[in-house]
Amino acid sequence: MAFIKKPVTGMRDILPDEMAVRNYLMGIIRDTYRAYGFSQIETPVVEHIENLTGKQGGENEKLIFKIMKRGEKLSSEGEALKGGDFDALSDSGLRYDLTLPLARYYANNASKLPQPFKALQMGPVFRADRPQRGRFRQFMQCDIDILGDDTNLAEKELITATTEALSKLGFDKHNYKIILNDRRILFGMLKYAGFPEEDHEKILIILDKADKIGAEGVDEELKASGYSEDMIRRLRDLLSLSGKDREGVRRMSEAVDDPEVKAACENVTDIMDSIAAVRSRNIKLEFVPTLVRGMGYYTGTIFEIQVESFGSSVGGGGRYDKMIGKFTGKDVPAVGFSIGFERIMTLLMEEGFEIPENSKKTVYLVEKGMPSDRLGEIFNEAIERRSLGERILVTWMNKNKKFQKEQLTKEGYTEFKDFYREELKR
């Protein structure tokens, strides 16, 4: 059987030009976050299946790439296979995000980490999703998280650090904004409208579609799910009275009149006020009461980065104060923000982003058959120039030198130095 040269569906090969841009952008993101005191860590791409399917990842748990048991363990599950219990054949899977692995990492290493702990993670994650523009089955995530701080100083730092990274990437021109909500407001609204508590998560899945299907579409889905006109009307009235600024948050707080919702609204307002006072950048922050975020682990503040030129968010995050307790039995406050690196890459590559070059790129074209001792001298010269910050490529000279130089010029090389064997005779 012939080998298949194309990547698996949803995966992709990355060519040198794009890889150079990716490395450049990741360097900017990494340096920005380090300046805020975040420490880079790494977690395995493979996680225990029990962790991945622990009802923390929302809809993403349906998209897990599961890994089969191996050797004797797989053989012993033969009866399960006959009974159709395919889940019993898996003991691990590829991570669908970086947050769940971070929670496990913290639970396992907390005694060795500073408190609070500011974590930076950059790495691939995997979801068996339908590929589309800016969405792949293997993609890079860039996360920052603060664990052990129960105040909203953590949220404020995440927002300022993330927006600074985006600004340094040249992303300000895309007119992006950060939308903000609190899960406690969502549950308070549903309780106020009279929806049964056991259905709240199911209703949030419908409400999460508001930006795609609109208010009428949400109402229709709620009606089709059997909820009363009165419940739907009460929820719609709440959503219609709330604006996107701090005044809208205040109206929401007064209308619901619940202690939990009041605390959540104060949290949102305080974050908005602090971010508005950051004079170095114009950070656009809006309150959107229909913002849900798909992950099941969020407990409080949630946020997303929205761009007008893109149909979906290019980043997001929120507070997940209950997740670490799933591992240790003791809850630890935690909040994180993730940049949608692949979607940002898609936008930048579509507009022809180029890396600003700070050093000149030179090619040493060496005639084939150059004696070894002379070639060593050429290597020494190249090494010396590289030590001064130059980029030197040493390569054999082709017969069609003109075409070779044209191709290298397209790669960004601006200077050429030719080395011929005849030089030995001069």
Image (tube, grey):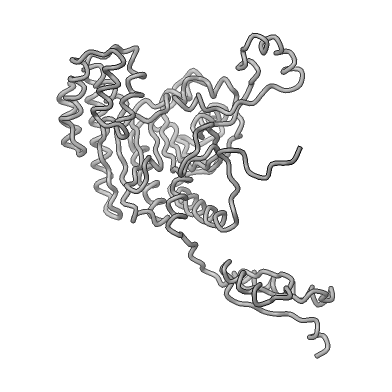
Q: Quick check: 5 left or right of 135?
A: right
State the image coordinates of residue 184 (x, y, percent, origin top left): 30, 24
State the image coordinates of residue 205 (x, y, percent, origin top left): 36, 24
Q: Quick check: 102 left or right of 213?
A: right
Q: In this view, does 77 lie above or below 120?
A: above
Quadrant for the N terminus, please. top right
State the image coordinates of residue 97 (x, y, percent, origin top left): 50, 33
Q: Residue furthest front?
A: 1
Residue toward you, 110 or 42 = 42
Q: Quadrant of residue 50?
A: top right
Residue at figure coordinates x 30%, y 21% from the top left: 221
Residue toward you, 373 or 331 = 373
Q: In which quarter of the image is residue 306?
A: top left
State the image coordinates of residue 310 (x, y, percent, origin top left): 37, 45
Residue toward you, 35 or 50 = 50
Q: Is residue 165 above or below residue 245?
A: below
Q: Is residue 168 above or below residue 101?
A: below
